[in-house]
Amino acid sequence: GDELLERFGLSDAADRLVKTFSGGMRRRLDLAASLVAAPPVLFLDEPTTGLDPLSRNELWALLRELVHDGATLVLTTQYLEEADRLADDIVVLDRGQIAAAGTPSELKARIGGDRVEVVVGAAEHVARAADALARFAEGSVSSDTEASRVVAAVHPGTRLVEVVRALDRAGVDATDVHRREATLDDVFLTLTGTHAQHEVAA
């Protein structure tokens, strides 16, 4: 008991009522209580939901320690970044059905390489930006009018300067144009379309 409280940074709060704990402290207490019997397999359902970024990072570090010490973790999460950082193997569930399974690297490799992401200064420029980006795209271009953003997987060798020129010719006011690697969000959206409900078992 005392060792677990120490490990989870709860020793100073041991004499306080749980109702006075922050969200992050309650999550750590839940995890500590789960470990009293030292289970070889631990099931966690969305363990970081509602946590601030600092508390989430602290909990991720604790989960990595548990795995390093030999525990097997099975967790569900709607934060795909969390699955990417923590999981050795991932199962993507879409409306209760398995949409894909594999390591984070395998899943990202399935949908191709780099993305070019364009953020425009006004929502009315999204459609023009999508048209301009289409000539460089492998597959469809994803548009998010609310975020004034357009994303596409691009052909190998695509140069950002060419994309910027095409946007300029189309009269698009781009506030940001950058290349990035595929993420698990891209994997999910590519495999299932753009509907929002998803869950990942990692």
Image (cartoon, rainbow, N blue to C red):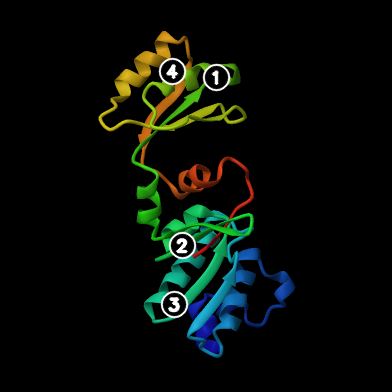
The amino acid type found where label 3 is placed reads Leu
Dot 2 crowding, Cα within 10 Å, few <14, some 14–19, many 20+: many
Query: At 39% across and 66% down in the image, what residue appears?
Result: 88
As rendered, which of 10 and 70 lies closer to the eye?
70
Is the residue under label 1 in contact with that under label 3 (CB below 8 Å)? no
Distance between the alpha carbons at the discs numbered 2 and 4? 34 Å
Q: Secondary structure at mark 1?
A: helix
Mark 2 residue type = Ile
Looking at the image, tell me whether mark 3 or mark 2 is earlier in sequence order.
3
**Does residue 139 sit above or below 76 in this rendering?**
above
Give the numbered dot on residue 127: 1
Could you say which is closer to the camera, residue 52 or residue 101? 101
| In-image side of 150 versus 95 (left or right) | left
Residue position for label 2: 90
Which badge, 3 or 4, comes first in the chain's sequence? 3
Instruction: From the viewer's perspective, tell me whether residue 155 is left or right of residue 200.
Output: left
Q: CA distance from mark 3 to mark 2?
A: 18 Å
Q: Which mark is residue 132?
A: 4
Q: Secondary structure at mark 4?
A: helix
Measuring 48% from the left and 14% from the top, which residue is drawn there?
Answer: 172
Q: CA distance from mark 1 to mark 2?
A: 34 Å
* Residue 140 in picture, x, y percent from top left: 47, 31
Determine crowd level at label 3: few under 14, some 14-19, many 20+ residues with C-alpha closer than 10 A: some
Whichever of labels 4 and 1 marks the residue nearer the N terminus, that label is 1
Identified at 32% across, 24% down, the residue is: 160
Q: Position of residue 12 (x, y in %)?
A: 58, 78
Dot in front, 3 or 1 = 1
Few, some or many residues within 10 Å of mark 4 (<14, 14–19, 20+):
many
Disc 1 marks which amino acid?
Answer: Ala
Disc 4 marks a residue whose amino acid type is Ala
